Every structure is written in C-alpha cells, then in structure tokens.
Amino acid sequence: MNINRRHGTIAFFITLGACLTVVAVVLNVSWIHINGRRLALDILSVVLFSIIIAGITINTIFLVREIRRNERQDSFLNAVTHELKTPIASIRLYLETLQRHNSVDDAQRQKFYSIMRSDTDRLLGTVEQVLKAGELGQRRRDQHSARIELHPLVAECVGTVARRHKLPAEAIELAPVPGDVRIFVLGNLEDLRTATLNLLDNAVKYSPGGVHIRCRVDIEHYTWAVLSITDTGVGLQPRELKRVFKRFYRVTSNDLVKIKGTGLGLFLVRTIVQQHGGEIRASSDGPGKGTTMTVQLPLAVGDGRAQKAMPA
C-alpha cells in the first residue's frame, strides 16, 4: 500500500513538472509572438524562460530524489526493526522455557544456550553495523593508520565467516598470492576487517543455492593491492552495480525477500575503502550468474611496500 502511494506521488510530481514546463513553453512562445518586434523583450523572455525551466526541472528532480530517499529510509527502519525484534523475541522465548520448565534435560538446555548465543551475536552485529555507519562519517582518513598485510587478514576473515555460517572448508577458497609476495597496505585494521567480513557475509547471504566463494589478493599496476571476492549467487542486474553501494539500498526481488539485512553492509564497505584512498566496484554477468566485488587499495610504500615472504 505504501509503495503504491509513493509510486503515485513520484508520478504526480513528474507529471506536474512536465505540465509546468509545457505551460512555460506556451507562455514564452506567446510572449515572443506578441512582442516579436521588441528585441530586448525577446531576449529577456528567453532568459526568464530558461530560468523557469531550470527551476522546474531542478525542483522535480529533488522532489523525486527525496521521495526515493525516504522510501529507502523506511525500508531500512523496517529491516532494522525486524533484525532487532526477531532475536530478542527468540531469546525471550527460550528464557521463558528454561524458567518455566525445570525438567529440561542438559542436552536440550545446551541447545537453547547455543541458539540464544547465536541470536545475541546477530543482535550485536546489527547494532554494531548501525553504530559503525555513524562513526565512519566523522572519522578522519588517517586515524589509527598502521601497516597491514592483506592476505593474512583476508584468511582470518574467511575463517571467521566459515565458522559463523557453519560452512565446510571448501565453501570459501582463498588463493595464495602469486610468487609468495607479501602485500601491505596502510590503514585501520578494524575497519579493513569490517569491510572484508561484510563482503564475505554478503557473498554467503546472497548464495541461497549453495556457497562457493573464491577470494584472491594480488598487485595491480605495481601501485594497487587488489582483493576480489567472487560468488556463484543471485547476481546483479546492470542497473544495480552502482546502486548496491548506496546507504539503505537493498536488491529487490521476490526470490530475495527472506534474505536478512539492513542495507548498510556494502555502504560501509565503500565508505571504508574510500577513506583508505581506494575504490570498490561490482561486476556480474546478470541475475543467477554470481557477483564479483573488487577492492583496490594503495600499496604501502617505504617499509610497507610489497616484500617477498621470509622462509619459516
């Protein structure tokens, strides 16, 4: 109901802008026709006409953008509400069960504890993601900058995500760096860990038919450290390749309705990468054909430049 109302509002403002533009054109043509012999008035009318058209166009664009932004914010609030309410309700249910039924055996009790711990992690993850989105906007780019070796960091994140989602070892593959080169970047360790975890979580989440993720760390043009994460999941349409990095944006599809999220994950990744002087891009051959996320970060120079791995 709300979506139909918003679409109707957008259509109304677009129609209104078009009608006002037509009226402005008619009035301008009439003015020129009536005062055709007055050159100064003709010039003035053209200038005023251009200003009116520009004003109408800008006004319509901003109105439509504001409506779409409000729509994304509403979707975000609904998603966050669900992500907060669901684990809280689950934890409450299991606590009440444990409180009311003293006859629960130890095995069942341990199962309840495990579920509640999982729900607590989910709840904490949602809260941390929202807080992180606000924190990154106020952080200086060079704050807490350190020399970080990229491949071990990605390996650590791969292990974390595999344990979190209870995946077999072969579900996420991390290729060795060609030539055993050690690749270093300068940045905030926790932020880069957050970005990598979000990319891996996203790849797992949007692979409902089975998780098969390939990760690779390499050097490009002797100046960039490149991390690529490729999945075989739902894929993206061409128009979504840039939109997925916007705040609150979520891919809309009937097949993806049950996929949980707040629409902040890839926005956080893009913000972190940009604060480290890098870039991120998404590529996909289309729906159902998987997605590749490619992160480029400046190679550390001086003591942090790429080095050969030392023998153990």
Image (cartoon, rainbow, N blue to C red):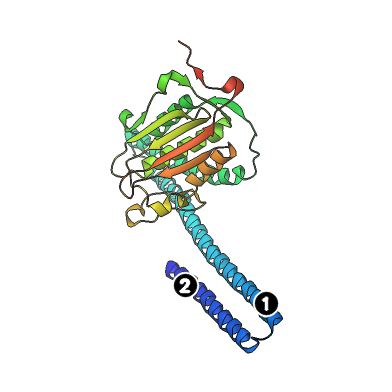
Work out which residue is located at the far top of the displayed protein and give it.
312
Q: Secondary structure at mark 2?
A: helix
Q: Is residue 2 left or right of residue 138?
A: left
Q: Taking the image as drawn, is residue 31 in sight?
A: yes
Q: Secondary structure at mark 1?
A: helix
At label 2, which amino acid type do we have? Answer: Ala
**Residue 255, which numbered label?**
none
- Residue at left offset 51%, top offset 31%: 224
Pinpoint residue 244: horizontal percent, then vertical percent: 45, 50
Q: Of the residues tagged 2 and 1, which is closer to the observer?
A: 1
Q: Which residue is mark 2?
A: 11
Please, is residue 312 above or below residue 179 in the view?
A: above
The residue closer to the viewer here, 258 or 266, is 266
The residue closer to the viewer here, 168 or 181, is 181
Answer with the quarter of the image where residue 55 lies: bottom right
Tell me the quadrant of the picture where the C terminus can be found. top left
- Residue at left offset 37%, top offset 26%: 175
